[in-house]
Amino acid sequence: MPPKTSLWLVVPLLLLGVTATGGDQQIGERIVYTALRPANLDLYLFDSPGATPRRLTNHPALDYNPVFSPGGRWVVFCSERRGNPHLYILDLENPGPPRLLTASDGLDDAPAFSPEGRRLAFVSTRDGSADIFVMPFSARGPEAATSAVNLTRHKAGDFNPAFSPDGKQIAFASDRDGYRQSDIYVMQADGTKVRRLTNSPGWDGSPSWSQDGQVIYFYSRRENPGPGIYRMKADGSDQKQVYAGPALSPSFALEGRLTFTDREKGRWQIFTMADDGDDKRRESDGQRDYWAPVFDPQSGRMVCHGTGDAGPAATLQSPVPGPFVVHNRKKVQLPGRVLELWAVRGAFPSLDPTGTQLVFSEHFTRIMKSNLDGSGQRVVFERPGTSVWRPDWSKDGQWIACAVGPTFAGPSARADIWKFRPDGTEAVNLTDGAPGNNGFPSFSPDGKQIVFRSGRDGNHELYLMNADGTNVRRLTNDPGTDTMPAFSPQGKQVAFTSNRDGDHEIYTLDLGPEGKPKALRRITSSPGFDTHPSYSPDGKWLVFTSQRGGLNDEEPLLQVFNPQPYGEIHALRLVDGQVVRLTHNKWEDGPPTWVKAPVLKP
């Protein structure tokens, strides 16, 4: 058995921004990862309540959370068309393509104008977690964003700011006092005198002020799973429900009415009602889903975001249907290398040695093979009636291994490791007859061994076996959970996830001759989960998913399957522990894999 853990804490981990590469540099590597996010969202303008909407954007990326400037000329919104979510601006008086308004290395989202229109509040992860920022508003471009000031500077997530009508206060939601829940807070417009207004289980979010500033509206899950719409006085007193829901995103419409989103006949629609909950009216056309309505009090127009077109790209069975390749591909530079990030909808993607074909789990039901762009999809392995997941393509391209059985289960649950050819033939159960939960197979570089996770001895530990299932030997022995192993490209080390020190962190285990376990090192140290490690092709870096950035939005607003809405992709350099955050968004980014890629034109 390996020696007791030696806690390897090198220089404090550095959270760096990703540098987009320019001009002539060519891509030599790819990180392909699973993304759970909507297929397409665009902006819609209703010239009057109930009118046929006008589509303001038509882009395969996600456009959402629009707001009018005071006076109604400008619409500021969030878009993921450059990879990271950034703020953009549209001129409704002089129609043209959207212009970039912010360009940080992080997420910029949830814009909110001050009453006089000279300031713009928004949420950004540029300093690590989701914080409330304020910057001067300028329609000319991203220069004003360099003057943005972080008002909250909190390690937890702060979401969806709203200026009071006099511009002196900002209400916002935050999860600083609860895990996967939020409450409503208010602060002065300079970030001082932060006060908590609500204290309830679940989510209280999306605050909005009444026109006289005496009342704050918000949604809450405190009494029903909906959630419902609530109101309270601006000091937090007299909290009560005004609409049972399910309803989200309350804000003021015309004539003192309240607008919000609600479910009707299977779609999210825009409604208004009197502020006491009476006289509910649908204001959208019922042709698609719509969210986050905002009215311009001068013109009476309404802007919101809604579903767009999925497009002709390859799709598959998924909790979030849409094109196989998510439209946020970007080229980035790490020290000593240039690579490209590809987000796909298939779970646990694994690539062949050429980097042009991949296998993946189709919603844990079967293993599919396709080209990298999702074309040519075909089923290569399935076992009806049970889950099939975590495929791994051997480095020689000859075999694929996967797990068959429960996906989230204890050590005693029966799951097996299967191996088959890339065309689906010669399928064999490598752990047939072995007890426990056997999963997460990873081939050695020469294809002769497989490291995997097993519960056969009553606890989740790491094991090594020959690629034909023989010569099984145990690598770890700890009361914690050891799981998600990955072989290094040199075959002399395994990276894995463990909670043996109280939190889910990344560890490495050196292997001696015949796979004998040797030095064990803890590689990460951060609050929350660090999981699903994968080595770079040269073995000098690890890529993994992490919770360290926290949540970037209120969970009820993310209308997708999101069991882990805090997963972001990070890379860690093994020689010094330097960490680089690669993705910034509010969706779940899942298991990554890092491979060499054919040289592409920039």
Image: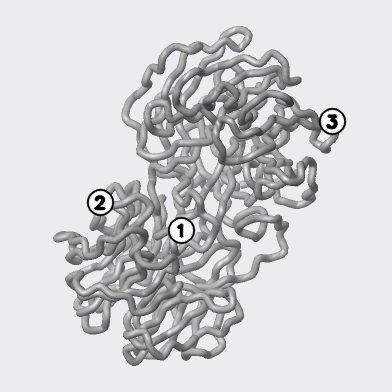
Please state which amino acid type lies under the numbered disc 1. Answer: Pro
Q: CA distance from mark 2 to mark 1?
A: 20 Å
Q: Which mark is residue 153?
A: 2
| Colouring convention used in this rendered image of the protein | one colour
Cβ–Cβ below 8 Å for labels 1 and 3?
Answer: no
Q: Could you classify mark 3 by the number of other residues whose Cα lies within 10 Å: few (under 14), some (14-19), or many (20 or more)?
A: few
Q: Nearer the viewer, residue 383 or 445?
A: 383
Cβ–Cβ below 8 Å for labels 2 and 1?
Answer: no
The structure residue drawn at horizontal position 47% and vertical position 52%, both measured from the top left corner, is: 565
Q: Which mark is residue 34?
A: none
* Disc 3 target residue: 426
Q: Quadrant of residue 471 in the image? A: top right
Instruction: Let me know if residue 126 appears in the view.
Output: no
Please state which amino acid type lies under the numbered disc 3. Answer: Glu
Residue 14 position within the rendered picture, expressed as x and y whole percent measured from the top left: 35, 35
Residue 3 position within the rendered picture, expressed as x and y whole percent measured from the top left: 44, 11
Foreground tag (3 vs 2): 3
The structure residue drawn at horizontal position 39% and vertical position 72%, both measured from the top left corner, is: 228
Q: Quadrant of residue 114 in the image? A: bottom left
Residue 415 position within the rendered picture, expressed as x and y whole percent measured from the top left: 66, 33
Cβ–Cβ below 8 Å for labels 3 and 2?
Answer: no
Given the current orientation, which residue lies at the most extreme left position? 193
Q: CA distance from mark 3 to mark 2?
A: 56 Å
Mark 2 or 1, nearer chain start: 1
Foreground tag (2 vs 1): 2
SS class, disc 2: loop
* Disc 1 target residue: 85
Q: In the rendered view, tell whether residue 265 sits above or below residue 153.
A: below
